Image: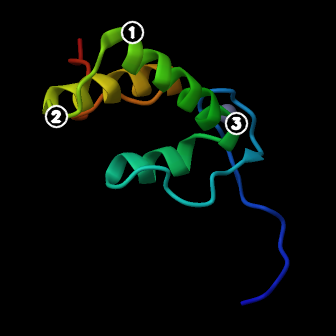
Amino acid sequence: MGDTQHPPTVACRRCLRPDAPALGRPPLPGPSGEEILAAICRDCWADWQAMEVKVINELRLNFMDPQALQILDAHMREFLALAAPGGIAPSAG
Ligand SMILES: [Zn+2]
């Protein structure tokens, strides 16, 4: 406690920097937040937050509709280069 350490870094899956600045805490509740914390840097998350506004406006997402969250989640995962939800594995050929 109280140590002044280097700020946390993350190997970011989107910008591919090996020591990008980490978020420090999950930006979202639930498993998606943990996943983003472990895989996405602060800068890329900020990029998504700007894009998120555009997506919501463009698609006129209404968060009274639970499907809107899924749509936004899918856009977020695509933007951040995360795996698709539900762990969809490609069938082995
Ligand atoms: Zn990044």
Label 2 sits on what residue type? Answer: Met
Label 3: which residue? 43
Task: Note whether 33 is above or below 15 in the view shown.
Answer: below
Q: Nearer the viewer, residue 51 or 36?
A: 51
Q: Quadrant of residue 40?
A: top right
- Asked if residue 88 shows in the view, the reply is no
Q: In front: mark 3 or mark 1?
A: 1
Q: Is residue 25 left or right of residue 28?
A: right
Instruction: State how far apart marks 2 and 1 are (Cα).
Output: 17 Å
Instruction: Check disc 3: other Cα within 10 Å, few if <14, some if 14-19, many if 20+.
Output: some
* Label located before the other in sequence (2 or 1): 1
* Residue 60 horizontal/vertical position (percent): 30, 15
Mark drawn on residue 64? 2
Q: Residue at x 43, y 20 (%)?
A: 78
Q: Report the residue marked by disc 1.
A: 58
Q: Is residue 68 above or below residue 43?
A: above
> Can you say which quadrant of the picture contains the C terminus?
top left
